[in-house]
Image (tube, rainbow, N blue to C red):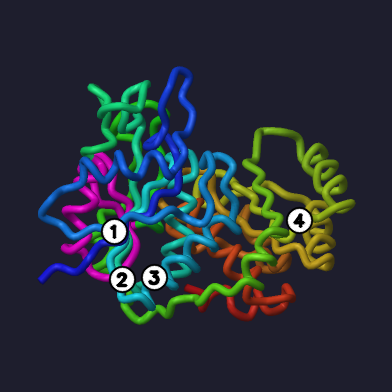
């Protein structure tokens, strides 16, 4: 017998109405949503702890969602479908994947167009909302434990999800959930979220620099300016397989940021293929002690940095656990 599904609404285009679009209050939207749910499934609808435009979501919002899911797990729910805005859907997916691991069954989805018409009285004539929701609901009892993204008839492992188009219905890409699950360890523990974690996450400062073809002297100036107020984490998106031109001053400035407890992480701005360090230009990595991304996507790197920030208070602990962190 199929177990009850917890359908959690967190806002986004899915629940918008009007012209221009604006969110329908959750207490008005959920009864309309309930009218279009499949009759052959036992589904209970919930409102997420935070409802907002996904472009405004931060780590604390996703941790509150995880905490809510973990509370519902104690109430015997083990299958969750999350409705979330698409702007930061890849980040939400990656954070949930990092923190929930294989502790339960979760599928996130959203839509490029609202479920309801402008008046909010009926389903919209042209929309991907109901198709995406039905696909997620069809899959939730089929998947192994883990976190996934369902969109446009694709089931993607959450850690690898990437939004690839701003308006097309086929908006997300990533590694097939089936392929990823076959290669993934099933022994990863969940991270139990406390109020203290949520409070700490409100202060998480993660800065990403996608390198541009500028003079090294300009990069030096930028790093010097950053020393005044360093973030907890600086991600440097380099070229190709991780290539980045540096000089002695750049290395010294990176080391100075590290001395201020700023974790400096090297990744690539290329979407697929991962990191490799086979060129002579990358020999400086050994001395600088820069952290190297081993993540499945840029959102997954953000999620890993967040998890390290919540777990460890010193950069030395980041170094000690970076390779073993899941």
Q: Earlier in the sequence, mark 4 or mark 1?
A: 1
In the image, is residue 33 above or below residue 178? above
Q: CA distance from mark 2 to mark 1?
A: 10 Å
Label 4 with label 1: CB-CB less than 8 Å: no
| For the residues bearing labels 2 and 3, Cβ distance under 8 angstroms | yes
Give me the disc on residue 77: 2
Whole-number angstrom distance, CA of label 2 to CA of label 3 = 6 Å
Is 162 rendered above or below residue 266? Answer: above
SS of the residue at dot 3? helix
Residue highlighted by disc 1: 44
Q: Are marks 2 and 1 in contact (CB under 8 Å)?
A: yes
Structural distance between the alpha carbons of marks 4 and 2: 38 Å
Residue wearing tag 4? 231
Q: Quadrant of the N terminus?
A: bottom left
**Is residue 144 one of those drawn in magenta?**
yes
| Mark positioned earlier in the residue sequence (2 or 1) | 1
Q: Earlier in the sequence, mark 2 or mark 3?
A: 3
Left or right: residue 145 versus residue 252 is left
Residue 310 sits in which quadrant?
bottom right
Q: Nearer the viewer, residue 57 or 29?
A: 29
Q: Which span of residues is magenta-colored?
A: 132-157
Q: Secondary structure at mark 2?
A: loop
Q: Which residue is mark 3?
A: 72
Badge 4 element: loop
Mark 4 or 3: in front is 3
Residue 292: image x %, image y %? 58, 63
């Amino acid at each position: 017998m199929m177990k009850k599904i917890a359908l959690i609404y967190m806002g986004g285009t899915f629940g918008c109405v009007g012209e221009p679009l604006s969110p329908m209050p959750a207490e008005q939207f959920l009864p309309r949503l309930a009218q279009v749910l499949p009759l052959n499934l036992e589904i209970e609808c919930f409102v997420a702890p935070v409802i907002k435009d996904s472009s405004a979501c931060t780590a604390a919002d996703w941790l509150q969602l995880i905490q809510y899911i973990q509370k519902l797990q104690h109430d015997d729910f083990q299958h969750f479908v999350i409705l979330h805005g698409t702007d930061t859907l890849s980040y939400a997916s990656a954070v949930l994947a990092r923190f929930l691991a294989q502790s339960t069954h979760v599928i996130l989805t959203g839509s490029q167009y609202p479920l309801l018409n402008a008046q909010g009285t009926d389903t919209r004539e042209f929309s991907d909302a109901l198709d995406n929701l039905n696909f997620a609901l069809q899959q939730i009892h089929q998947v192994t434990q883990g976190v996934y993204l369902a969109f446009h008839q694709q089931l993607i492992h959450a850690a690898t999800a990437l939004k690839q188009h701003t308006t097309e219905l086929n908006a997300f890409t990533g590694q097939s959930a089936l392929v990823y699950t076959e290669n993934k360890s099933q022994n990863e523990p969940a991270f139990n979220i406390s109020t203290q974690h949520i409070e700490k996450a409100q202060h998480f400062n993660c800065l990403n620099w996608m390198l541009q073809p500028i003079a090294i002297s300009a990069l030096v100036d930028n790093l010097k300016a950053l020393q005044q107020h360093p973030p907890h984490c600086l991600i440097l998106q380099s070229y190709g397989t991780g290539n980045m031109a540096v000089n002695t001053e750049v290395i010294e400035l990176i080391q100075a940021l590290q001395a201020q407890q700023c974790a400096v992480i090297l990744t690539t701005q290329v979407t697929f293929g991962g990191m490799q360090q086979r060129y002579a230009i990358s020999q400086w990595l050994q001395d600088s002690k820069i952290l190297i991304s081993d993540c499945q996507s840029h959102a997954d790197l953000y999620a890993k940095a967040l998890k390290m920030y919540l777990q460890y208070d010193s950069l030395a602990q980041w170094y000690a656990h970076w390779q073993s962190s899941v």
